[in-house]
Image (cartoon, rainbow, N blue to C red):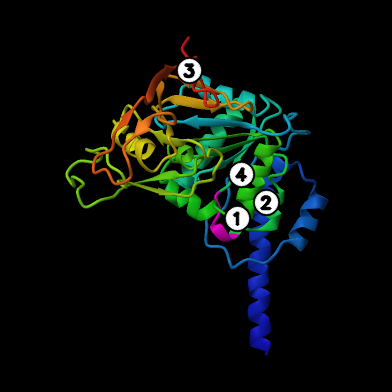
């Protein structure tokens, strides 16, 4: 009995230390006082002992968050690669601007996410935002104390890497629901590469399917059932998002989905480029390259039993910076 009680006490100490570390790391985002932190630590549910790295250090808290637009926030979807400084500044501005933006970075898509997440948070801090990188396991992502400390975040950023790693940690957890609540309150939610892919459902996983695939080169065909998808975070459900698009020649991959399983609207975002979805639903392009939009919603498409995918009347838009696309009407405009 004495050994059992000793074991339980040791486990409880580990949980308390874990929770204290997470709360302290996020206190800058939440603006929580020391007394409130103690209360949250005492009320937090006890997860399994932690195995993940600690969060990155946080700067001093700011007095209050930026005002948010009620109803819906902004999506800031970057196609990977190097991000122009203007894009990073735009994201901070949409999160409230210098002195008001409170941004949380999630870099779990990368095996080196602890380091890259800290670097991204530092980029945001250099522009006047309060920012931390939250490097957590799935068990930690389901803690009430962690989810509550996102309540005043004005921006959330998902880093690049492998989108399947990111969804494995966050999808269906209390932290994911807290992020969605901030988006509903007007926060900007964005990501790059894998962090872009996760924003749509269906989500492209990166795997190519089918016995007829060319194992020496990826995506050499337009074929139904050739693209593996999974459930993403579902901020966009009526379009499919692809990234690194022009740079990695992913046209066949996007066409296989848009003309096949659907949805029948797709956006291929090139590197260094952002597709910004305004609260109104309007798509706006910014950055160094372009976004290719394939709209087959009103097209005549080959049937499900056809061995070759085809369509008549599908519309294609190549949209550079300054261009817009309205998914409600299908109307595109270039500058």
* Residue 329 place in picture, x, y as percent: 53, 22
Give the CA distance from mark 2 to mark 3.
39 Å
| Residue 334 located left or right of residue 328 | left
Q: CA distance from mark 2 to mark 4?
A: 18 Å
Crowding around mark 3 (Cα neighbors within 10 Å: few <14, some 14 to 19, many 20+) is: some
Answer yes or no: do the residues labelled 2 and 3 have beta carbons within 8 Å? Answer: no
Q: Residue furthest top?
A: 335
- Element type at mark 2: helix
- Pointers 3 and 1 in contact (C-beta within 8 Å): no
Residue bearing the label numbered 3? 332
Q: Which mark is residue 173?
A: 1
Q: Which quadrant of the view contains residue 186? A: top right
Q: Which residue is mark 4?
A: 57
Instruction: Kindly identify which residue carries mark 2.
Output: 147
Distance of label 3 from label 1 (alpha carbons): 37 Å
Farthest residue, direction right: 35
How far from the left and from the top, in percent, is residue 151?
72, 44
Q: CA distance from mark 2 to mark 1?
A: 9 Å
Q: Is residue 321 above or below residue 88?
A: above
**Which mark's residue is nearer the viewer, 4 or 1?**
1
Name which of mark 2 and mark 4 comes first in the sequence. Answer: 4
Tag of residue 259: none
């Amino acid at each position: 009995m004495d050994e059992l009680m000793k074991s339980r006490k040791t486990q409880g100490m580990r949980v308390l230390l874990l929770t204290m570390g997470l709360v302290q790391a996020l206190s800058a985002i939440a603006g929580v006082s020391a007394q409130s932190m103690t209360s949250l630590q005492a009320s937090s549910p006890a997860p399994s002992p932690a195995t993940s790295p600690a969060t990155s250090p946080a700067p001093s808290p700011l007095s209050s968050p930026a005002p948010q637009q009620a109803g819906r926030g902004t999506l800031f979807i970057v196609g990977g690669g190097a991000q122009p400084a203007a894009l990073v500044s735009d994201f901070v501005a949409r999160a409230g601007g210098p002195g008001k933006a409170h941004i949380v970075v999630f870099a779990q898509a990368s095996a080196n996410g602890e380091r890259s997440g800290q670097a991204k948070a530092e980029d945001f801090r250099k522009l006047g935002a309060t920012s931390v990188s939250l490097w957590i396991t799935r068990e930690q992502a389901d803690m009430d104390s962690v989810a509550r400390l996102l309540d005043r975040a004005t921006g959330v950023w998902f880093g690049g890497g492998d989108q399947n790693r990111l969804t494995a940690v966050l999808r269906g957890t209390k932290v994911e629901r807290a992020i969605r609540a901030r988006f509903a309150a007007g926060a900007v939610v964005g990501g790059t590469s894998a962090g872009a892919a996760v924003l749509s459902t269906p989500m492209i996983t990166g795997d190519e399917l089918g016995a007829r695939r060319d194992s020496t080169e990826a995506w050499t065909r337009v074929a139904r059932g050739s693209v593996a998808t999974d459930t993403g975070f579902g901020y966009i459900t009526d379009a499919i998002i692809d990234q690194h698009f022009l740079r990695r020649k992913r046209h066949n991959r996007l066409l296989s989905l848009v003309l096949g399983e659907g949805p029948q609207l797709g956006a291929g975002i090139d590197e260094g480029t952002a597709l910004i979805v305004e609260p109104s639903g309007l798509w706006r392009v910014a950055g160094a390259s372009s976004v290719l939009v394939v709209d087959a919603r009103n097209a005549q498409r080959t049937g499900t039993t056809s061995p070759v995918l085809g369509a008549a009347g599908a519309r294609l838009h190549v949209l550079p910076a300054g261009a817009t696309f309205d998914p409600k009407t299908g109307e595109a405009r270039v500058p």
